[in-house]
Each structure stands twice: as structure tokens, then as C-alpha cells.
Image (cartoon, rainbow, N blue to C red):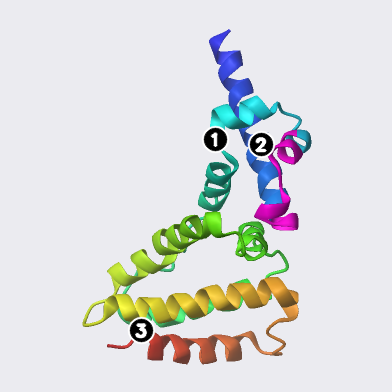
Amino acid sequence: MDEIRQRDREGTRRRILDAARRLFADLGYDQVTMRTIAAEADANIALINRYFGSKRELFAEVLAMQGRFPGVLEGPEEELPRRLAEYVADRLRSDQGSVVLAALIRSSSAPEIHEIIRDRVSSAILEPLSARLSGPDAAFRATVATALVTGTGTMRQLYGPDAADVPDHEAVVARLTAVFEACLGA
């Protein structure tokens, strides 16, 4: 019986997270209510509060679903600008936008979650990137590169996969590599 209850708990939790992610991406934080999430997830509001505590904490959990740079930060530091450029160019041309990024963009005007957004950008991008850099002003250089990464994500979200309307993908990577070299150079 405990195993069935545990599977049901995890299934309900997953439905709530999926519903919240879709709703935050479509409507933004301010427009989504716990009641809306409960209806979308076919769950009781009390369960949302029990599993996540509050809408704010649920939003933080949704943001945590977005991974870090998979494989981008591994490897020699001198190749990092190229890896970041390839990552950004691929994201710009992707047919599938980030649901989490859409939630961030549509929710950025809600002051109660600014700290959550700032913490997520710091832990997922800024801090790991800064830790990979050698030389002086690593945090500053990582901040400039993070601004480029998040800005291109916003561009992709706003304009879709045609944001980088360039016939040659390698041309985009080459330009972005030069920009990242300038950002990350000591």
C-alpha cells in the first residue's frame, strides 16, 4: 500500500509541476493562481500547498527544472567561448523554445519572485561559469557572458527560431565565439 501511495504522490507532484510550468510560461506568475494550477493538474489545492508550500516555492521548483549548461562548461577553458557560442546558436535556431525561459520572461514583472529568478540565474549560469574562469575579474567576465546568454534566450523567446535569420549556422557560431572571447578574455 505504501508503494502505491508513493507512486500516486509522485504522479500527482509531477502533474502539478507540469501544469505549473505550462501555465507560468503561457500566462506569467501574476496571472496564475493556485486554483488554476489545481484545475489544470486535476489536483487538490491542499496537495499543492503540501508538496510545494506556496505558489512562490512552486515557481522556484519550476525554474529548477531547467538544467544548467549540459557539457558546455566541461573541457579546456580556451575552448569555452566556442562551446558557449555553439550552445547559444543552437538555442537561437531551436524549433522548441524553453518553457522555463518563457515563464521567466512572462513573470519578470512580479517583484516577489525577483530573488528566485536572480538566484536561479546565479546558480545555473553565472556561478558555474565564473568558477571555470581563471585570471582577474572572473565574476565580472562571467556576468557579461551571462548577460549575452540570457539576452539571446530572450531574443529566441520573443522572435522564435527565425531570430538569427542567417543562412549559415557556422557564421552565427563564429560571431558569437568572437563575442564570447571578448567577454571572457582576461
**Which amino acid, by three-letter code, is at mark 1?**
Phe
Q: Of helix, strand and loop, which mostly describes the magenta segment?
A: helix
**Residue 71 shown left or right of residue 154 in the figure:** left
**Which amino acid, by three-letter code, is at mark 2?**
Ile
Q: Which residue is mark 1?
A: 52
Secondary-structure class at tag 3: helix
Closer to us: 17 or 174: 17
The quadrant the C terminus occupies is bottom left
Mark 3 vs mark 1, CA separation in Å: 38 Å
Query: Relative to residue 104, is residue 3 depicted above or below?
Result: above
Secondary-structure class at tag 1: helix
Query: Disc 3 or disc 2, which is closer to the eye?
Result: 2
Q: Are discs 1 and 2 less than 8 Å apart at CB?
A: yes
Query: Relative to residue 47, is residue 54 depicted above or below?
Result: below
Badge 2 crowding class, 10 Å Cα cut-off, few under 14, some 14 to 19, many 20 or more, is many
User: Where's residue 171, x and y in %?
Assistant: 59, 91
